[in-house]
Image (cartoon, rainbow, N blue to C red):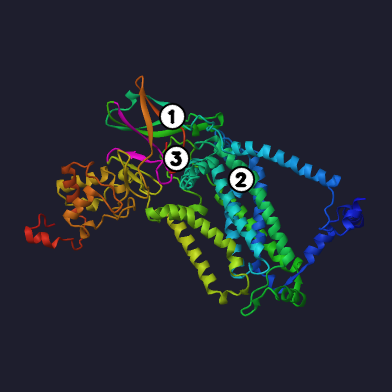
Amino acid sequence: MDDDDGKKTPDKNVVRPPSRRGVLFGVGLALNGIAGALILSPIVRYFLGRGRTPPKSDHEWITLGPIAQFPEGETRLASYRNPFRTPGDGATADIPCWVRHIAADSFQVFAINCAHLGCPVRWFPQSALFLCPCHGGAYYQDGSLAAGPPTRGLFEYKYKIENGALAILAGRLPTLAESP
Amino acid sequence: MIERLRAIGRWIDRRLQLAGPIGEMARHRVPRSTASWFYVFGSVTFVLFMLQIVTGICLAFTYVPSGAEAWNSLQALNHEVPAGWFLRGLHFWGSTFMVGVMLIHMIQVFLFGAFKFPRELTWVFGVALMLLTLGMAFSGQVLRFDQDAYWGIGIGASIAGRIPLTGGTVVRLMLGGPIIAGDTLSRFFAAHVFIVPGLLFLCAGLHVWMVLKLGINEWPMPGRVVTRARYVQEYEELTRKDGVPFVPDAFQRDLVAAGLAVLAVVACAALFGPFGPSGPPDPTIIQTVPKPDFFFLWLYGALSLLPRWMETPFVLIAPVVGIVLLFLIPFISGVGEKHWTRRPISVLGVLLAITVFITLTALGSTSPWAPHMDAWTADPTPAQYLVGRSPLERQGALVLQYKQCRNCHALDGKGGQRGPALDRVATRLTRDQLIRQVLQGGGNMPSYGKNLRPPEVTALVAFLETLHGGGVRARDASRSEVHAPTTNR
């Protein structure tokens, strides 16, 4: 019976009543379409990764330790545990940053990442400069751009002082798209 | 005995039915001119791809795709697992050779006009194969998950972050979260082991299928013009009149070349061993100078040499334009002359691309723009620049060392090359210009006005004024009119 259908030359002018096979085909397409859509939306969310489950943001307050660790007038390397860490992160969960204690309750906390391409900047207290080893970006002690290819100063974290400890709002890798 | 084996073979093929099509494929006639050493690079690339699959699967038996364990598992491969170091070496050198041979293949088919009618789609899939191969190279570098890999992803994310509007989402898709972490590695592992190789297989299959169906591009002749109306007929005539069976006439050269290439990979793996891993992926170890693998050094170089305003447009637009242009080549010039002597623009284009690639790669590997982070303590002031100097001038030499000037400025060939060498700086700048340059900076130099006390500036400039190498010292004509010069060394 099925073989006969193939041999007939289809006449486009004649509207044929939907055959059982035609209906089933449509139902099949629709079912698979619905299944596909149901699978697709969680996949898209899945690919966006951990951390952003609204209304939570990519940032959390993390303490860097007591203020006494950061002598006044100096810039010191500190590190914090990424608030969104997982057991599989290993050493990558520890994120460094530069803490500049200006005076009393006045601080600046800079991201380690150069504003050019994210390489780790190093602090040189003698010349009071941050230098980047990759392409030679240079920043003054207040994080403002001194020389080199970056288009802006160092990325800065928001900070607050709680119970004598310095805390910063951190979590996301700072890039030109989204600074912390 | 042999007869018995034949019988078994016949029994199997009675059911499998593959001997027919394979035999037909092997014996299909190709132009005699294509049985040439110039035509081996495509099949060599394919064989190297197979080698990568084999060595990659072997490595997967030990490698742990976890941010916490990947680096350790590479150490185990290098030092504990028998022949682990050799397999890592094969995989690394295999990838290097695969990229290299693939680029040679691409240049050859381009110069031989192989992309012209009716092989446009073969070229399109070839470009896709090149992009996928580079994708494998980058994701493979991430899987090494060492210091360079960690900061390398950071560079990738920083570039992606420059995309207007969607930059943040792209960065997040790339990292699999807000920051580089274990999820990032898992993501690149899935891409390197499943997604990209799957696409590579698909595209390579279609690429080879089209080569078989459309025939190997004949050796081009000046004046033999491709037209849509006659080409297929002419090609068929050529293969009929002056053709040879693909196996063995053309295939034997492929076979020899593939054998040589694999032997070269084996030799490199045995002699030079595996690549890395460098330090552990601990971002708190910031005493590092990240550098990409050699396929991406040219980009690393370009990113330093571009003017600041041009960087983002270049990084975002140039690759898109370049890739679209590559895809469009067969549609821009799908017919006409195939021979390179009749296609000067194509030849110049290839020469330009090769020159740019080699130059930027060489610059990227020496990276003269990067400050030498330890030059201020590692490279002492050359003794000849201290002989016969006054105490003030020697104090200036100390300032020069201590304030990290040497990180960017070389003396006697040692030190950074970010700024100009200072050996003869007094022949270029007068005393006033030196003071101004030190205090205000400029010309890509930070200003030291806030970080140097006036006596330090005086000492530093006094020392710099002695650096003239016996040449004629820069002199401010107007100043000598006002009052006599201060020193006369």
Residue at 56% across, 59% down: B324
Which region shows up in magenta?
A105-126
Measured from the top left, where is residue B68 in percent x and y?
Answer: 55, 33
For residue A178, the mark is 3
Query: In the image, is B403 to the left or to the right of B44?
Result: left
For residue B192, the mark is 2
Query: In the image, is A112 to the left or to the right of B16?
Result: left
Task: State the SS at label 3.
Answer: loop
Measured from the top left, where is residue B69 in percent x and y?
Answer: 57, 34
Q: Which residue, given by chain and number where applicable, does mark 1 sit on?
A: A80
Q: Chain of mark 3?
A: A
Q: Amino acid at mark 1?
A: Tyr
Measured from the top left, where is residue B166 in percent x and y?
Answer: 50, 45
Do the residues indicated by labels 2 and 3 lie within the same chain of the protein?
A: no
Q: Residue A116 magenta-drawn? A: yes
Q: Amino acid at mark 3?
A: Glu
For residue B165, the mark is none
Q: Chain of mark 1?
A: A
